[in-house]
Image (spheres, rainbow, N blue to C red):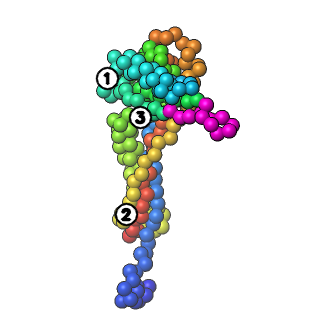
Amino acid sequence: MVVAGSALAQNGAAPVPQNVLQLSAQGSVEVQQDLLQMTLVATRDGADAAVVQSQLKGALDAALQEAKKQAQAGQMDVRTGNFNLSPRYTREGKINGWQGRAELVLEGRDFPRITQAAGRITTLNVEHVGFDLSREQRQRSASEAQKLAIDSFRQKAQELARGFGFADYTLREVSVSDSQDSIGRPRMMAAAQAKSFAADAPVPVEAGKTTVVVTVSGSVQLR
């Protein structure tokens, strides 16, 4: 093997690494989702494009005015979503009307503030409710999961080294990646269902949990 390695080196090729082990390990942390996003929409349909656009703008302006009363950075951020207008065609391919859609997005960590604001908005309907992790929560969870993954990687590498008859190992290369898997199903609400609540009543929501998973993979040199 030494001779072969020398020959490879003389020919300009690197010798094949010996006693190198590939492995991976994971660390996971289950955490409550602490970020709520609600999308409210208005749809309009009519024969005149300018009228439809004006109706959508009026509905969105009124919703923005109401939502901004409760806005607070990080707790409830307010932003507009898609605003579009498109023609409606007959079977013959002729335009016979216009349809449009406007969106308003409420997002933040203060669930009561967001749901109450959504309940007070009368010109838009709730179409989508989604949950996620805030940046701070994600960073904390990822750091904890990463520590677990690294500890698991080290333990596995040590056990495998001894299992193959080696006393120890040295790290050659390593990569770290993270992912997030939802547990359970967040409560979603269609616009038609939202209409059944009182105008100023908070929209009911229920967050789920998510698992932050960090994977450490790489190779070690057995010695």
Residue 161: percent from the left, percent from the top?
44, 64
Residue that appears at 36% across and 66% down: 172
Q: In this view, which residue lies farthest toward the left?
A: 73
Residue that appears at 58% across and 29% down: 97
Give the labeled residue for mark 1.
72
Residue that appears at 52% across and 10% down: 198
* Picture quadrant where residue 173 is located: bottom left
Amino acid type at circle 1 is Gln
Amino acid type at circle 2 is Glu
176 in relation to 143, above or below? below
Label 2 vs label 1, nearer the camera: 1
127 in relation to 147, above or below? above
**Circle on res. 173:** 2
Label 2 vs label 1: CA separation?
Answer: 45 Å
Label 2 vs label 3, nearer the camera: 3
Residue density around tag 3, few if under 14, some if 14–19, many if 20 or more, within 10 Å: many
Give the labeled residue for mark 3.
133
Of residues 167 and 209, the one drawn nearer to the viewer in this rendering:
209
* Position of the N terminus by quadrant: bottom left
Q: Which residues are magenta?
A: 85-96
Residue 204: percent from the left, percent from the top?
51, 18
